[in-house]
Amino acid sequence: MDKIIIKNLNLFYGEKQILKNINLNIPQNKITSIIGPSGCGKSSLLKCINRLNDLIPESKVEGQVLLDGKNIYSDNTDVVEIRRKIGLVFQKPNPFPKSIYDNVAYGVRINGTKNKREISNIVERSLKDAGLWDEVKDRLRDSAMLLSGGQQQRLCIARALATDPEVIMMDEPCSALDPVSTYKIEDLMVKLKEKYTIILVTHNMQQAARISDFTGLLYLGELVEFGETSQIFTRPREKLTENYISGRL
């Protein structure tokens, strides 16, 4: 079953076309990796999926992005609700200069929850889902800035989970992390797909091969090939995909 269906998607920043006629189905409760060289439109694609490109002056989107069959670019779409349903974790950990507790509780409070016990329960659940609870449960009031880089990234994942999303997008979440922290994030993603649909942008092809169920190659704004990860990495249909994966591109 497909959670997100992208049809004939084009993205422009002013006169420059960033994405060109993207057609892509994102399966539910799977990890879908988007690979490709820098500057090919991977991050821009993520921003189209939760309408963060709306915040960029002179951006224009053509085509459709269907979430559970409903076009998020229709006139009556609640954009705030779309961004709640489709969370985004950025490349560099970006905790707020607040306590660990307040970082996770921030979105919950913004969404109108005022009951302190309910907020505390959500904070605990989110930190557990992000694999961080046992490491921070005795120092929830400490500054999030005191955490290690890997812990900060898992805290940002917990913050995204706290608003009860349906899709979690991760933009190079391990690029600034050491191998041990990278393993923890990868292991976490595999566990999270039981509850969420995950879209991962990565330059690390070994990472895509290890943990993703489906992989797509984006090159110069075009989706070159998409399929099951095992097929993409062992039997690519396109010569460009083979060249990119083998390092000849």
Image (tube, helix red, strand yellow):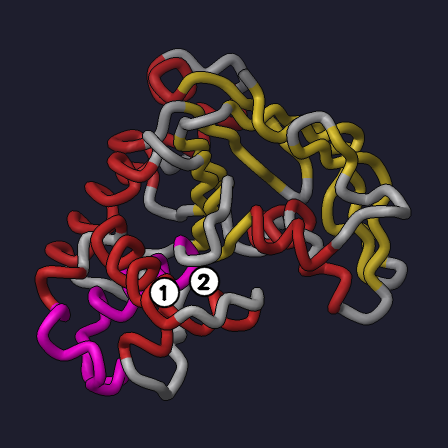
153 drawn magenta: yes
Instruction: Assign the magenta stretch its main secondary structure.
Output: helix
The mark total stands at 2
Q: Position of residue 90 (x, y in %)?
A: 45, 62
Vertical position of residue 233 compared to residue 200: above or below: above
Q: Quadrant of the N terminus?
A: top right
Q: Is residue 33 left or right of residue 23?
A: left
Residue 93 showing in the rendered view: no
The 10 Å Cα crowd at callout 2, few under 14, some 14 to 19, many 20 or more, is some
Q: Secondary structure at mark 1?
A: helix
The 10 Å Cα crowd at callout 1, few under 14, some 14 to 19, many 20 or more, is many
Q: Secondary structure at mark 2?
A: loop
25 drawn magenta: no
Based on the displayed image, in which of its 4 quarters is residue 160 positioned?
bottom left
Q: Position of residue 210 (x, y in %)?
A: 25, 31
Q: Position of residue 73 (x, y in %)?
A: 81, 44
Q: Are marks 1 and 2 in contact (CB under 8 Å)?
A: yes
Question: Mark 1 or 2, which is nearer the eye?
Answer: 1
The mark found on residue 200 in the picture is none
Vertical position of residue 199 compared to residue 175: above or below: above
Based on the displayed image, in which of its 4 quarters is residue 226 positioned?
top right
Residue 95 showing in the rendered view: yes
Front residue (pair 166, 62): 166
Which span of residues is magenta-colored? Answer: 136-161
Vertical position of residue 37 compared to residue 141: above or below: above
Task: State the residue at coordinates (74%, 68%).
Answer: 55
Task: State the residue at coordinates (38%, 22%).
Answer: 229
The mark found on residue 90 in the picture is 2
Residue denoted by label 1: 156
Considering only order in the chain, which callout, 2 or 1, is on the residue closer to the N terminus?
Answer: 2
Vertical position of residue 151 compared to residue 169: above or below: below
Q: Three-letter amino acid code at disc 1?
A: Cys
